[in-house]
Image: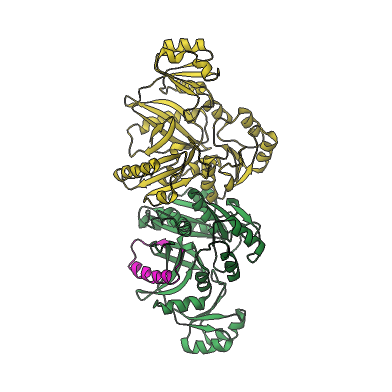
Chain colours: A yellow, B green
Amino acid sequence: MKIGVIGGGQLGRMLALAGTPLGMNFAFLDPAPDACAAPLGEHLRADYGDQDHLRQLADEVDLVTFEFESVPAETVAFLSQFVPVYPSAEALRIARDRLFEKSMFRDLGIPTPAFADILSQADLDAAVASIGLPAVLKTRTLGYDGKGQKVLRSAEDVVGTFAELGSVPCLLEGFVPFTGEVSLVAVRGRDGETRFYPLVHNTHESGILRLSVASEDHPLQSLAEDYVGRVLKQLDYVGVMAFEFFEVDGGLKANEIAPRVHNSGHWTIEGAECSQFQNHLRAIAGLPLGSTAKVGESAMLNFIGEVPAVDKIVALDDCHLHHYGKAFKVGRKVGHATLRCSDMATLQDKIAEVEALIAG
Amino acid sequence: MKIGVIGGGQLGRMLALAGTPLGMNFAFLDPAPDACAAPLGEHLRADYGDQDHLRQLADEVDLVTFEFESVPAETVAFLSQFVPVYPSAEALRIARDRLFEKSMFRDLGIPTPAFADILSQADLDAAVASIGLPAVLKTRTLGYDGKGQKVLRSAEDVVGTFAELGSVPCLLEGFVPFTGEVSLVAVRGRDGETRFYPLVHNTHESGILRLSVASEDHPLQSLAEDYVGRVLKQLDYVGVMAFEFFEVDGGLKANEIAPRVHNSGHWTIEGAECSQFQNHLRAIAGLPLGSTAKVGESAMLNFIGEVPAVDKIVALDDCHLHHYGKAFKVGRKVGHATLRCSDMATLQDKIAEVEALIAG
């Protein structure tokens, strides 16, 4: 079976590493000459709207999936004429727009921060009056890793901010005094079978994920599964989805979904019986899903900007390096390490060791 | 770092899958147009003696290694002029010739079956008179998976057998009434650091490995480590080596070595902290070695001729499929499954389930 992937970054790279042992081959559509997934399959170097190359991809592969949600809707619509695309165009349409996403949460009875659609500075002023400050203004589409958003703390911050974010459709979200950020990675098969990984506690820095720790036995696991299950069913979703929540007052408020394999699920490569990458491929290929059970206690640390010295990382016991083969650049995710230990205390010690390497 | 691999079969494929997360890239020299490692790196399609392509490979990569020991000595000598090659030409020279190999065992005080160098039918007749029957006549070089050998049980079997094996240099080995076959996979770094995986119990069928079970706590582990350690030191070996033994009367007799990653070590991908593939790459790249400790209890079953239905294999809990992406052909290794379980009793049950799938 040959899988087409829109995007050839580290997520595509790890999909190929997980799918090759299933006998799958891969083709990546990515305009970047140095797409880091390219060594693991065919590289169609073209823009995402290039219909000639999209048609070529559709002709060559059995299925198409993607590694980022901001794929143009026209790309998905075009491909869907010729080849199955998972997740569906409808799932993408919702997930890529914060207004549609938040509205879906509300419609499904899933708690989420107060929000308002902002199409002008006047809309923003009115919404701030109603929702209050602090609040966060986010572009409805194309935001990632903290890009395309601004925290508004005072009346001054509000002045001219709609223009500052490019005068594009935005969402104002009430600030949530959260005690933690968690994500639930789930997978749903073509037949509707659904499995959930353990809740992961995430730590961000400057809007970029730094550390994910898979929880041992989280008291909110079943509540999170209930919420995520509603969304998966609503969208008749196929594949892996990551769902980010804020922990607030012992409950959960939905932040956003990612209709794809997700950074907070990278620990599953070593830390779960079947990784999020293989489970995504199993789901879209119509194969039985794999076990989401943990193997030991795991955490993932991102390498941002650069990968520490490889000889130092691999010298650490319980540490598994994932170097993405990308050029180093400030703020860019260029690798990660998974720690898999027998118990949480050891895991905490090991996290400190990797953090010391990162600090250099 | 870019690694050149002589041979592009499943061993090269699994090396690439293990090395990519270390940030390594791969080039495979293999004349086969459908070399199954090719999708994971650059494919130099050329004969092993093709000096133009060998030179190209040497220019492109930082290190060269190989996935089979019958690489022509001239190939290794040629490459070694331009680029480091691991394991060394000397290790290959010994490992690829059963006479050199067995003589080394004897010189190092490692028990091995009685043997005699056979260069003619007259040599064979004399050796049979001295060693006795049953015995096994094997070509000194190029044998694998039971090919290039004949079991001699009666005087009749001896007649004309030297010609039958091609009138090439052979070794006669006394038959050993073994109670089991075990292998020890070891890895030695450039600095001499050496690590051993747990002894593996192997079951062959028609000369081809069928089943490998990693032992829980084998009474002969330290004896085997002693023997293998002597060979590694003698050869100043760098990389992974597999050492096959017969279990005889509660002791070990050396059968043969493979100067490379080995089929009986495939279980380490899921079953050990660091796989034989990653440890081989760490060793040759001069990186610290990874832990050879087990993760649970593991076994590996080979898929020979064909891979059973993928949906049935992946539906089994604790089962990890490795499909090599090769055309199915009688007697050909086309994939394997690793079972990793919490205890030996569960493992035995799971082995039976996979065997039932193989039996169809």
**Outermost residue toward the left?**
A345
Assess whether residue B230 is covered by the magenta stretch: yes
In the image, taking residue B323 as reference, residue A156 lies left or right, namely: left
Residue B12: horizontal and vertical position, in percent? 55, 58
Magenta residue span: B213-239
- Residue A285 lies in quadrant: top right
Residue A307: horizontal and vertical position, in percent? 45, 44
Foreground pick, A32 / A348: A32
Query: Looking at the image, is A169 positioned above or below residue B29?
Result: above
- Residue B220 lies in quadrant: bottom left
Question: Does the rendering let one see residue B352?
Answer: no
Query: Looking at the image, is A135 positioned above or below residue A290?
Result: above
Q: How many marks?
A: 0
Question: Does the rendering let one see residue B56?
Answer: yes
Residue B194: horizontal and vertical position, in percent? 39, 63
Residue at the (34%, 65%) spot, across then down: B218
Assess whether residue B314 is covered by the magenta stretch: no
Foreground pick, B333 / B358: B333
